[in-house]
Amino acid sequence: MRRQSDVFVLGAIELFCIAAEAGSFTAAAKHAGVTPAAVSRAMAKLEQRLGVRLFARTTRKVRLTDAGQVYFAKCKPALAQLTEAEREVSGQQLLPAGTVRISVPTPIGHHLLLPLLTRFRVQYPQVRMDVHLSNRNVDFSSEEFDLAIRGRDQPDSGLVVRKLLDAPLCVVAAPDYLARHGTPRKLDDLAAHDCIQFLLPRTGLPVPWRFRTDDGEVELATEGGLHCAEDLLGTATLARAGGGLLQTYRFIVDADLRQGVLEEVLPQHAGCTRPFSLVYPGARHMPLRVRLLIDFLVAAVDRPATRFGIGNP
Protein backbone atom coordinates (compact mmCIF):
# COMPACT_ATOMS: atom_id res chain seq x y z
CA MET A 1 0.00 0.00 0.00
CA ARG A 2 1.41 3.39 -1.02
CA ARG A 3 2.00 5.72 1.91
CA GLN A 4 -0.30 8.75 1.61
CA SER A 5 0.99 10.95 4.44
CA ASP A 6 3.57 11.17 7.18
CA VAL A 7 3.95 12.56 10.67
CA PHE A 8 5.13 15.93 9.35
CA VAL A 9 2.06 16.37 7.17
CA LEU A 10 -0.37 15.63 9.98
CA GLY A 11 1.43 17.99 12.35
CA ALA A 12 1.66 20.68 9.68
CA ILE A 13 -2.02 20.36 8.88
CA GLU A 14 -2.87 20.83 12.56
CA LEU A 15 -0.66 23.93 12.70
CA PHE A 16 -2.19 25.16 9.46
CA CYS A 17 -5.72 24.94 10.90
CA ILE A 18 -4.69 26.70 14.11
CA ALA A 19 -3.01 29.51 12.13
CA ALA A 20 -5.98 29.80 9.78
CA GLU A 21 -8.39 30.26 12.70
CA ALA A 22 -6.09 32.63 14.59
CA GLY A 23 -5.02 34.65 11.53
CA SER A 24 -1.50 34.71 12.97
CA PHE A 25 1.57 32.47 12.99
CA THR A 26 2.55 33.94 16.36
CA ALA A 27 -0.82 33.06 17.93
CA ALA A 28 -0.66 29.59 16.40
CA ALA A 29 2.84 29.10 17.81
CA LYS A 30 1.73 30.15 21.29
CA HIS A 31 -1.25 27.76 21.11
CA ALA A 32 0.89 24.84 19.92
CA GLY A 33 3.84 25.54 22.22
CA VAL A 34 6.39 26.10 19.44
CA THR A 35 8.19 29.13 18.04
CA PRO A 36 6.68 31.37 15.33
CA ALA A 37 9.66 30.49 13.14
CA ALA A 38 8.78 26.80 13.44
CA VAL A 39 5.22 27.50 12.32
CA SER A 40 6.46 29.60 9.41
CA ARG A 41 8.86 26.84 8.28
CA ALA A 42 6.14 24.19 8.56
CA MET A 43 3.75 26.26 6.46
CA ALA A 44 6.42 26.88 3.83
CA LYS A 45 7.13 23.15 3.58
CA LEU A 46 3.40 22.35 3.39
CA GLU A 47 2.91 24.90 0.61
CA GLN A 48 5.90 23.45 -1.24
CA ARG A 49 4.47 19.96 -0.92
CA LEU A 50 1.04 21.05 -2.22
CA GLY A 51 2.42 23.38 -4.87
CA VAL A 52 0.10 26.26 -3.90
CA ARG A 53 0.18 29.24 -1.57
CA LEU A 54 -2.08 28.73 1.43
CA PHE A 55 -1.51 32.09 3.13
CA ALA A 56 -1.14 35.67 2.02
CA ARG A 57 1.36 37.10 4.52
CA THR A 58 1.76 40.62 5.92
CA THR A 59 4.00 41.89 8.71
CA ARG A 60 1.21 41.62 11.31
CA LYS A 61 -1.08 38.83 10.23
CA VAL A 62 -1.79 36.16 7.65
CA ARG A 63 -4.95 35.37 5.75
CA LEU A 64 -5.99 32.38 3.72
CA THR A 65 -5.75 32.46 -0.05
CA ASP A 66 -8.58 30.97 -2.12
CA ALA A 67 -6.68 27.66 -2.21
CA GLY A 68 -6.08 27.94 1.53
CA GLN A 69 -9.79 28.37 2.20
CA VAL A 70 -10.59 25.23 0.20
CA TYR A 71 -7.88 23.29 2.02
CA PHE A 72 -9.03 24.54 5.44
CA ALA A 73 -12.65 23.55 4.74
CA LYS A 74 -11.50 19.96 4.12
CA CYS A 75 -8.81 19.70 6.80
CA LYS A 76 -10.73 21.03 9.81
CA PRO A 77 -13.50 18.37 9.86
CA ALA A 78 -10.95 15.65 9.02
CA LEU A 79 -8.86 16.59 12.08
CA ALA A 80 -12.00 16.64 14.22
CA GLN A 81 -12.81 13.09 13.09
CA LEU A 82 -9.28 11.90 13.92
CA THR A 83 -9.55 13.43 17.40
CA GLU A 84 -12.94 11.80 17.89
CA ALA A 85 -11.58 8.42 16.78
CA GLU A 86 -8.69 8.65 19.24
CA ARG A 87 -11.07 9.44 22.09
CA GLU A 88 -13.39 6.57 21.24
CA VAL A 89 -10.70 3.90 20.99
CA SER A 90 -8.91 5.13 24.11
CA GLY A 91 -12.10 5.19 26.17
CA GLN A 92 -12.03 8.92 26.76
CA GLN A 93 -15.52 9.25 25.30
CA LEU A 94 -17.12 7.58 28.29
CA LEU A 95 -17.82 11.21 29.24
CA PRO A 96 -18.52 12.96 25.90
CA ALA A 97 -17.06 16.41 25.36
CA GLY A 98 -16.88 19.03 22.66
CA THR A 99 -19.37 21.30 20.92
CA VAL A 100 -22.65 20.43 19.23
CA ARG A 101 -23.91 23.01 16.71
CA ILE A 102 -27.65 22.79 16.20
CA SER A 103 -30.07 24.88 14.14
CA VAL A 104 -33.67 25.14 15.35
CA PRO A 105 -36.77 27.14 14.34
CA THR A 106 -37.59 29.83 16.88
CA PRO A 107 -40.91 28.44 18.17
CA ILE A 108 -39.75 24.91 18.86
CA GLY A 109 -36.45 26.29 20.12
CA HIS A 110 -38.10 28.41 22.82
CA HIS A 111 -40.83 25.96 23.77
CA LEU A 112 -38.99 22.63 23.53
CA LEU A 113 -35.29 22.53 22.74
CA LEU A 114 -33.82 25.18 25.05
CA PRO A 115 -35.46 23.76 28.20
CA LEU A 116 -34.35 20.25 27.21
CA LEU A 117 -30.75 21.30 26.57
CA THR A 118 -30.37 22.39 30.18
CA ARG A 119 -31.38 18.88 31.24
CA PHE A 120 -29.00 17.31 28.72
CA ARG A 121 -26.06 19.30 30.07
CA VAL A 122 -26.82 18.18 33.61
CA GLN A 123 -26.05 14.66 32.37
CA TYR A 124 -23.18 15.68 30.07
CA PRO A 125 -21.61 18.88 31.45
CA GLN A 126 -18.55 18.64 29.19
CA VAL A 127 -20.69 19.07 26.06
CA ARG A 128 -21.06 22.67 24.89
CA MET A 129 -24.16 23.68 22.93
CA ASP A 130 -24.04 26.21 20.08
CA VAL A 131 -27.72 26.89 19.28
CA HIS A 132 -28.73 28.76 16.15
CA LEU A 133 -32.35 29.97 16.33
CA SER A 134 -33.60 30.57 12.80
CA ASN A 135 -36.39 29.52 10.47
CA ARG A 136 -34.13 29.08 7.45
CA ASN A 137 -32.68 25.76 6.31
CA VAL A 138 -28.94 25.68 7.02
CA ASP A 139 -26.37 24.21 4.63
CA PHE A 140 -24.64 21.34 6.41
CA SER A 141 -21.84 21.16 3.86
CA SER A 142 -20.67 24.76 4.31
CA GLU A 143 -21.93 25.88 7.74
CA GLU A 144 -20.57 23.04 9.90
CA PHE A 145 -23.79 22.28 11.75
CA ASP A 146 -24.10 18.86 13.39
CA LEU A 147 -27.86 18.75 13.68
CA ALA A 148 -31.04 20.66 12.88
CA ILE A 149 -34.71 20.48 13.76
CA ARG A 150 -36.93 21.28 10.80
CA GLY A 151 -40.55 21.12 9.77
CA ARG A 152 -41.84 20.21 6.31
CA ASP A 153 -40.08 18.04 3.75
CA GLN A 154 -36.30 18.23 3.33
CA PRO A 155 -35.18 18.32 -0.33
CA ASP A 156 -31.61 17.13 0.33
CA SER A 157 -31.59 13.35 -0.11
CA GLY A 158 -28.18 13.16 1.56
CA LEU A 159 -29.70 14.03 4.94
CA VAL A 160 -31.05 11.62 7.53
CA VAL A 161 -34.54 12.65 8.70
CA ARG A 162 -35.71 11.27 12.04
CA LYS A 163 -39.24 12.14 13.12
CA LEU A 164 -39.35 14.01 16.42
CA LEU A 165 -43.02 14.86 16.86
CA ASP A 166 -46.29 15.80 15.18
CA ALA A 167 -47.27 19.22 16.52
CA PRO A 168 -51.05 19.81 16.79
CA LEU A 169 -52.55 22.99 15.34
CA CYS A 170 -55.36 25.08 16.79
CA VAL A 171 -57.15 28.37 16.07
CA VAL A 172 -57.15 30.98 18.85
CA ALA A 173 -58.11 34.58 19.51
CA ALA A 174 -58.08 37.04 22.41
CA PRO A 175 -61.36 37.37 24.36
CA ASP A 176 -61.62 41.08 23.50
CA TYR A 177 -61.31 40.34 19.77
CA LEU A 178 -64.10 37.77 20.02
CA ALA A 179 -66.23 40.24 22.03
CA ARG A 180 -65.85 42.80 19.24
CA HIS A 181 -66.18 40.53 16.22
CA GLY A 182 -68.03 37.45 17.41
CA THR A 183 -66.90 33.83 17.61
CA PRO A 184 -66.77 31.83 14.35
CA ARG A 185 -68.91 28.71 14.52
CA LYS A 186 -68.10 27.13 11.15
CA LEU A 187 -65.29 27.30 8.62
CA ASP A 188 -67.24 29.61 6.29
CA ASP A 189 -67.30 32.22 9.08
CA LEU A 190 -63.53 32.74 8.71
CA ALA A 191 -64.12 34.89 5.61
CA ALA A 192 -65.65 37.59 7.84
CA HIS A 193 -62.71 37.67 10.27
CA ASP A 194 -59.26 39.23 10.47
CA CYS A 195 -56.93 36.23 10.25
CA ILE A 196 -53.30 36.83 11.24
CA GLN A 197 -50.94 35.55 8.54
CA PHE A 198 -47.46 34.05 8.78
CA LEU A 199 -45.43 34.35 5.58
CA LEU A 200 -43.28 31.42 4.50
CA PRO A 201 -39.58 32.39 4.40
CA ARG A 202 -38.91 30.78 1.01
CA THR A 203 -41.94 32.05 -0.91
CA GLY A 204 -43.26 35.04 1.04
CA LEU A 205 -46.75 33.55 0.76
CA PRO A 206 -49.13 33.06 3.72
CA VAL A 207 -49.27 29.60 5.26
CA PRO A 208 -52.63 27.95 4.45
CA TRP A 209 -54.74 26.98 7.45
CA ARG A 210 -55.52 23.28 7.89
CA PHE A 211 -58.69 21.77 9.32
CA ARG A 212 -60.18 18.35 9.93
CA THR A 213 -63.64 17.81 8.48
CA ASP A 214 -65.97 14.86 7.94
CA ASP A 215 -64.42 14.49 4.46
CA GLY A 216 -60.85 14.55 5.71
CA GLU A 217 -58.28 17.32 6.07
CA VAL A 218 -58.68 20.53 4.08
CA GLU A 219 -56.51 23.60 3.54
CA LEU A 220 -58.06 27.06 3.46
CA ALA A 221 -56.58 30.38 2.39
CA THR A 222 -57.53 33.06 4.91
CA GLU A 223 -57.10 36.82 4.83
CA GLY A 224 -56.21 39.51 7.30
CA GLY A 225 -54.54 42.85 7.72
CA LEU A 226 -51.66 41.64 9.91
CA HIS A 227 -48.82 39.72 8.27
CA CYS A 228 -45.74 38.46 10.13
CA ALA A 229 -42.53 37.11 8.58
CA GLU A 230 -39.41 35.35 9.89
CA ASP A 231 -40.49 34.89 13.52
CA LEU A 232 -43.57 32.73 14.03
CA LEU A 233 -43.75 33.75 17.70
CA GLY A 234 -44.68 37.26 16.54
CA THR A 235 -48.06 36.00 15.33
CA ALA A 236 -48.93 34.81 18.85
CA THR A 237 -48.02 38.26 20.22
CA LEU A 238 -50.39 39.82 17.70
CA ALA A 239 -53.16 37.42 18.71
CA ARG A 240 -52.70 38.17 22.41
CA ALA A 241 -53.03 41.87 21.59
CA GLY A 242 -56.41 41.27 19.94
CA GLY A 243 -55.16 41.42 16.36
CA GLY A 244 -57.38 38.65 15.06
CA LEU A 245 -57.77 34.92 14.73
CA LEU A 246 -54.62 32.83 14.50
CA GLN A 247 -53.90 29.25 13.57
CA THR A 248 -50.70 28.15 15.27
CA TYR A 249 -49.05 25.26 17.05
CA ARG A 250 -50.81 24.39 20.27
CA PHE A 251 -47.51 24.26 22.16
CA ILE A 252 -46.99 27.98 21.48
CA VAL A 253 -50.31 29.04 23.03
CA ASP A 254 -50.92 26.23 25.51
CA ALA A 255 -50.16 28.42 28.56
CA ASP A 256 -52.28 31.28 27.12
CA LEU A 257 -55.26 28.93 26.74
CA ARG A 258 -54.92 27.66 30.31
CA GLN A 259 -54.69 31.21 31.68
CA GLY A 260 -57.56 32.59 29.57
CA VAL A 261 -55.32 35.02 27.66
CA LEU A 262 -56.49 33.32 24.45
CA GLU A 263 -59.53 31.21 23.65
CA GLU A 264 -59.72 28.32 21.21
CA VAL A 265 -62.26 28.60 18.41
CA LEU A 266 -63.52 25.98 15.94
CA PRO A 267 -62.33 23.12 18.20
CA GLN A 268 -64.54 20.70 16.24
CA HIS A 269 -62.18 21.15 13.28
CA ALA A 270 -58.93 20.77 15.25
CA GLY A 271 -56.72 17.70 15.04
CA CYS A 272 -54.41 18.53 12.14
CA THR A 273 -50.69 18.42 12.82
CA ARG A 274 -47.42 19.40 11.22
CA PRO A 275 -44.26 17.30 11.68
CA PHE A 276 -40.92 18.31 13.12
CA SER A 277 -37.88 16.15 12.48
CA LEU A 278 -34.24 15.90 13.47
CA VAL A 279 -32.08 16.33 10.37
CA TYR A 280 -28.38 15.55 10.02
CA PRO A 281 -25.85 14.44 7.37
CA GLY A 282 -25.94 10.73 6.71
CA ALA A 283 -22.44 10.18 5.32
CA ARG A 284 -20.53 12.04 8.02
CA HIS A 285 -18.91 10.41 11.04
CA MET A 286 -21.14 11.22 13.99
CA PRO A 287 -19.43 12.06 17.30
CA LEU A 288 -20.75 10.37 20.39
CA ARG A 289 -21.98 13.70 21.82
CA VAL A 290 -24.24 14.19 18.77
CA ARG A 291 -25.60 10.63 18.93
CA LEU A 292 -26.37 11.05 22.61
CA LEU A 293 -28.19 14.34 22.01
CA ILE A 294 -30.31 12.82 19.24
CA ASP A 295 -31.32 9.87 21.41
CA PHE A 296 -31.97 12.18 24.37
CA LEU A 297 -34.29 14.47 22.37
CA VAL A 298 -36.25 11.61 20.82
CA ALA A 299 -36.72 9.96 24.22
CA ALA A 300 -37.66 13.23 25.94
CA VAL A 301 -40.37 14.06 23.41
CA ASP A 302 -41.64 10.48 23.33
CA ARG A 303 -42.18 10.48 27.10
CA PRO A 304 -45.21 12.38 28.47
CA ALA A 305 -44.40 15.74 26.87
CA THR A 306 -47.61 17.47 27.83
CA ARG A 307 -45.71 19.66 30.27
CA PHE A 308 -44.03 21.19 27.21
CA GLY A 309 -47.43 21.71 25.59
CA ILE A 310 -46.56 19.30 22.79
CA GLY A 311 -46.51 15.66 21.98
CA ASN A 312 -48.04 13.09 19.71
CA PRO A 313 -51.78 13.64 19.48
Image (tube, rainbow, N blue to C red):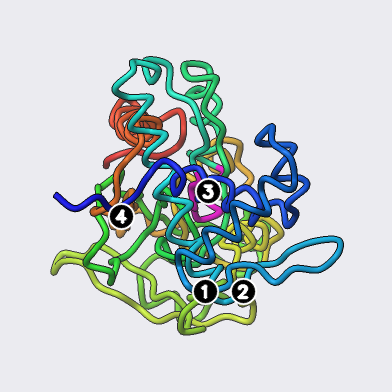
- Residue 281 — which label? 4
Disc ID at residue 12: 3
- The residues tagged by marks 2 and 3 sit, at their Cα atoms, a distance apart of 17 Å
Return the residue at label 2: 65
Residue at image position (46%, 84%) is: 203
Q: CA distance from mark 4 to mark 3?
A: 28 Å
Task: Give whichever of 77, 222 is nearer the camera.
Answer: 77
Label 3 or label 1, whichever comes before in sequence order: 3
**Foreground: disc 4 or disc 1:** 1
Q: CA distance from mark 2 to mark 4?
A: 28 Å
Q: Which residue is mark 1?
A: 52
Q: Amino acid at mark 4?
A: Pro
Nearest to viewer (mark 4 / mark 3): 3
Instruction: Determine whether the residue tagged by mark 4 lies in a helix, strand or loop.
Output: strand
> In this rendering, is residue 164 above or below 73?
above
Mark in front: 2 vs 3 = 3
- Check if mark 1's residue and mark 2's residue have beta carbons within 8 Å: yes
**Between marks 4 and 1, how big is the CA–CA gap?**
31 Å
Q: Is residue 252 in sight in this rendering?
A: yes
The kind of secondary structure element at disc 2 is loop
4 or 1: tag closer to the N-terminus? 1
Say what amino acid the circle numbered 3 marks: Ala
User: Up-down: is 256 above or below 19?
Assistant: above
For the record, the magenta segment spans 101-110
Between 7 and 275, the residue placed more toward the observer is 7
Pointer 3 local density, CA inside 10 Å: few below 14, some 14–19, many at least 20: some
In front: label 1 or label 2:
1
100 left or right, relative to 304: right
Residue drawn at x 37%, y 38% is 82
Mark 2 or mark 3: whose residue is earlier in sequence: 3
Mark with earlier residue (2, 4): 2
